[in-house]
Amino acid sequence: MNLDFFKLPYSNNSLEPTISSETISFHYEKHHKAYYDNLVRLLGESSIEEESLEDIILKAHKDESLRLLYNNASQVFNHDFFWESLSPEKIEPSDYLVSLIEDNFSSWDKFLDELKSKALNHFASGWVWLVLDSNGGLKIITTSNADSPIILGFKPLLTIDVWEHSYYIDYRNARALYLDSVIGSLINWNFVESNIKRHI
Ligand code: FE
C-alpha cells in the first residue's frame, strides 16, 4: 500500500496571489503533514494494514474506537484531493464538462453560484464538494470537520477546503473573497473531468 505523504504537484508560491506561499507552508507542510504523521502512527498502533486509504476510512468510520484514526485518515484523503483540485495555470472547462454541468445545474454560472454559496454558508470547519451520486447525477454537498463524500456513498470530483486554516493568513475572516479567488482562478477542471470519466 502506498502511504507516502502527498507530493504537492506545484511549488509553494505558484498559487499566489490567491493562496500565498505562507499559507501553503502552514496548510500543506504543517496541517496536512500532521494529519499524515498522526495517521501513520495510529495505523501502526491498530490492526488495520495493507489496505487503501479509502478502505481505512470506511473501516475506521464504522468503529467508534477508531475515531481518531478515521479523522486523520479522512483529513489526509481530503487534503490530497484538495491540492489536486487546484492548478497554478488557469484551466478552462472543456465543452464536455460545461455541457454535463449545464445538464445538472441548468447553467455554468448557477453551478458556480451554488458551489460558492454552499461553501460560504457551511457553518463549521469543513469542505465543499462536487460529487457524483449513485444515479450518475452531479450534486454539490458540504461535509463537516474530517468527513468526506466517501462515507456517504458519493464519488468525489472536486473539493475546496473551508477550514479557517485554508484562508485566515491571506483573507482573515473573509471566506467569500477566498472562495471567489479560488473558484475564479485556481480550479483544475481537467482533474474534475478525469474524475468524472473514471466513474461513468
Ligand atoms: Fe485544510
Image (cartoon, rainbow, N blue to C red):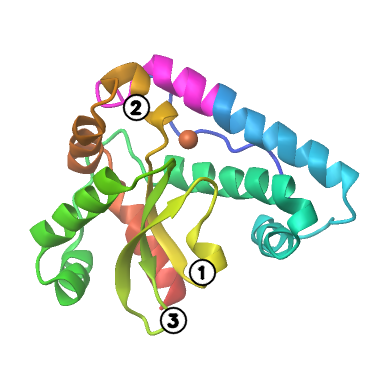
3D distance between C-alphas at marks 3 and 2: 32 Å
Pointer 3 residue? 134
- For the N terminus, give its image quadrant: bottom right
Task: Give the crowd class for mark 2: few <14, some 14-19, many >=20 residues within 10 Å.
Answer: many
Relative depth, front residue between 90 and 82: 82
Q: Residue 27: x percent and y percent?
A: 49, 26
Q: Residue 199: x percent and y percent?
A: 45, 74
Q: Earlier in the sequence, mark 1 or mark 2?
A: 1
Q: Is residue 189 left or right of residue 114?
A: right
Q: Is residue 188 left or right of residue 32?
A: left
Picture quadrant where residue 176 is located: top left
Mark linked to residue 106: none
Q: Residue 72: x percent and y percent?
A: 65, 43
- For the C terminus, give its image quadrant: bottom left
Give the magenta range. 15-29
Residue 1 in view here: no
Q: Amino acid at mark 1?
A: Leu
Dominant SS in magenta: helix
Q: Amino acid at mark 3?
A: Ser
3D distance between C-alphas at marks 1 and 2: 26 Å
Give the label, 1 or 3, closer to the camera. 1
Q: Can you name the residue that lies furthest to the top here?
A: 22
What secondary structure is marked by label 2?
loop
Picture quadrant where residue 95 is located: bottom left
Mark linked to residue 152: 1
Q: Earlier in the sequence, mark 3 or mark 2?
A: 3
The residue shown at (11%, 61%) is: 110
